């Protein structure tokens, strides 16, 4: 089975359609599938629902799909770095489903593991719990959350082999693993594709069974909040 493709557009060929549901890896601008996001923008796919921790910034990451009005709904934990997101949401142009961060990660993991729902105490007594089933266990109240199963997962990894085994680099792993497992099809962009057998089996973070297509390419790797200090006088 061929998994390695020559470009992000080729890797997404035949997978995109209007109204689809996409799970996207990344945290802030760390570990985001920027090449695949740009390819989705170029394809013009519309009315997309995206499950992702956040929505990038105004001109980078998932934020570019907001700018082109290709996103209909976001399922997210944090959206505070994107002014266009705020504008569209407050004007009623964008649907938003807030999830606590751990709940969102577990919803993706559960979907990938074939678990349709789970109970969590996170969100009880808040707007997050409205309209959801409540159940008591050992004297504590929990709410029912459903697993996420997406039409497509788009993720970013550090290294891959031709079979799709992936290694992530440090905190760039973040949401990428659970996002990868919950998609019916997973496309991974990577910085480097190494020969088969060169990855230490004990160092593989995501087995290739979850990954259907791979593309390698250059990445900009922006820093979302750059913090520096003044140089001290010598």
Image (spheres, helix red, strand yellow):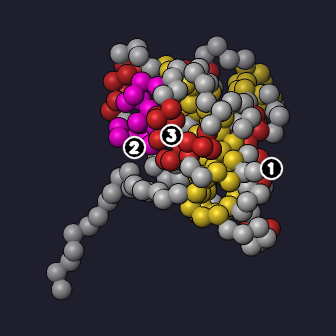
**10 Å crowding of disc 1: few (<14), some (14-19), many (20+):** few
User: Given the current orientation, which residue lies at the most extreme bottom position?
Assistant: 234
Q: Which residue is mark 3?
A: 39
Q: Which residue is mark 1?
A: 1
Magenta segment: 56-70
Q: Which residue is mark 2?
A: 60
Q: Are marks 3 and 2 in contact (CB under 8 Å)?
A: no
Q: Is residue 171 above or below residue 111?
A: below
The answer for how far apart the CA atoms under marks 1 and 2 are is 33 Å
Q: Is residue 69 magenta?
A: yes
Q: Earlier in the sequence, mark 1 or mark 2?
A: 1
**10 Å crowding of disc 3: few (<14), some (14-19), many (20+):** some
Q: Is residue 83 magenta?
A: no
Q: Residue 135: tell me if it is visible.
A: yes
Tell whether 115 sits left or right of 91: right
Secondary structure type for disc 3: helix
Secondary structure type for disc 2: loop
Which quadrant would residue 179 be assigned to in this image?
top right
Q: Earlier in the sequence, mark 1 or mark 3?
A: 1
Q: Nearer the viewer, residue 131 or 10?
A: 10
* Residue 42 x, y percent position in the rendering: 46, 35
* Residue 64 x, y percent position in the rendering: 40, 36
Which quadrant would residue 89 be assigned to in this image?
top left
Give me the residue at 72% from left, 51% from top: 3
Q: Earlier in the sequence, mark 3 or mark 2?
A: 3
């Amino acid at each position: 089975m061929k998994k390695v493709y020559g470009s992000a557009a080729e890797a997404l060929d035949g997978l995109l359609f209007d109204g689809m549901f996409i799970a996207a890896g990344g945290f802030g601008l760390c570990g985001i599938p920027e090449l695949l996001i740009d390819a989705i923008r170029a394809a013009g796919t519309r009315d997309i629902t995206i499950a992702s921790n956040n929505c990038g910034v105004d001109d980078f990451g998932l934020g570019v799909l907001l700018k082109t009005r290709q996103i209909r709904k976001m399922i997210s934990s944090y959206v505070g770095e994107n002014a266009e997101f705020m504008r569209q949401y407050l004007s009623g142009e964008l649907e938003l489903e807030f999830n606590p961060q751990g709940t969102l990660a577990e919803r993706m993991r559960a979907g990938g593991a074939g678990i349709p729902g789970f109970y969590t105490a996170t969100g009880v007594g808040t707007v997050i719990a409205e309209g959801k089933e409540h159940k008591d266990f050992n004297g504590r109240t929990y709410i029912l959350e459903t697993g996420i199963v997406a039409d497509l997962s788009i993720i970013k990894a550090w290294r891959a082999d031709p079979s799709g085994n992936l290694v992530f680099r440090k905190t760039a792993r973040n949401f990428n693993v659970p996002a990868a497992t919950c998609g019916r099809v997973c496309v991974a962009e990577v910085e480097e594709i190494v020969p088969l057998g060169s990855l230490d089996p004990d160092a593989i973070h995501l087995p290739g069974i979850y990954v259907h297509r791979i593309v390698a390419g250059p990445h900009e790797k922006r820093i979302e909040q750059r913090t520096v200090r003044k140089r001290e006088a010598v």
